[in-house]
Image (tube, grey):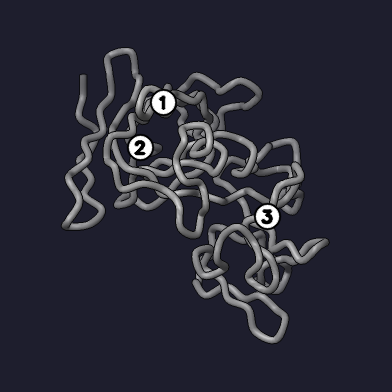
Amino acid sequence: MRLIATVAARKEEPECEIWEDDDLRVYFTADADIDADGANGQNGELAAYKLGDSGSDYLENGGMYEKHGKVYSSEDDNSIAILDKHGNPTIYAGGVVGCKTTYKDPQKASTDLDAYVDAATVPYIAVPGLIVRLTKGVVIGCRARATYKGKSVDCVVADTSSDKKVGELSIAAAKALGIASSPRNGGTDDPNILYELWPGVPAPGFVLIPS
């Protein structure tokens, strides 16, 4: 067993230890923020980001803002929005502001909304980037599981966050665990969700994406 890292996102939060078993299973316990990335309405659910800030999540949470009917990135390096040739977030049919996950289907174009994992309908977890860098197997696309209060949901590792942010579930994963699933005001501060992932083992229906 190996301690990969100890993370404390905020001073008032308990430290989170991330462990790797001898069989390369990685696990940790943490709370849960709700990740809406990849939710582009491609499976009939509400898109994460839309004109008029009418999506399931705030544009601000995606590093964007709207001005005079156009959406702009508020960050120099926007890793969430699908950008157009001018470097601005792309607006799709229905006012959807396209967003992406770290996982991208290698068979599809980067501008294809279906290339990304739909947070609204696919249970996934997001992990700190340090897990991707420090574990032995490929993490993005690998099998995962989240467990809370006796309920478990099989997941895929579809997204990454900063090294100081640990504990993120997709909308669909939160729903499956009975956790408030709104990206705007859902999630839980309870640090007792067990996150498990098996680097190098692809989740059903996915392929491993080396970093």
Q: Is residue 70 above or below residue 162?
A: below
Q: CA distance from mark 1 to mark 3?
A: 27 Å
Which residue is identified by label 2? 131
Which residue is identified by label 3? 47
* Tag shown at residue 174: none
Residue 64 percent coordinates (x, y): 56, 71
**Which secondary structure lies at badge 3?**
loop
- Is residue 210 in view from this perspective? no
Choose the circle earlier in sequence order: 1 or 2: 2
Q: Are marks 1 and 2 in contact (CB under 8 Å)?
A: yes
Residue 20 percent coordinates (x, y): 28, 24
1 or 3: mark nearer the eye: 3
Q: Residue at x 61, y 20 (%)?
A: 204
Direction right: furthest residue: 93
Look at label 1 and name its amino acid.
Leu
Residue 145 percent coordinates (x, y): 44, 25
Which of 88/71 is in front? 71
- Is residue 64 in view from this perspective? yes
Direction bottom: furthest residue: 68
Choose the circle earlier in sequence order: 2 or 3: 3
Look at label 2 and name its amino acid.
Ile
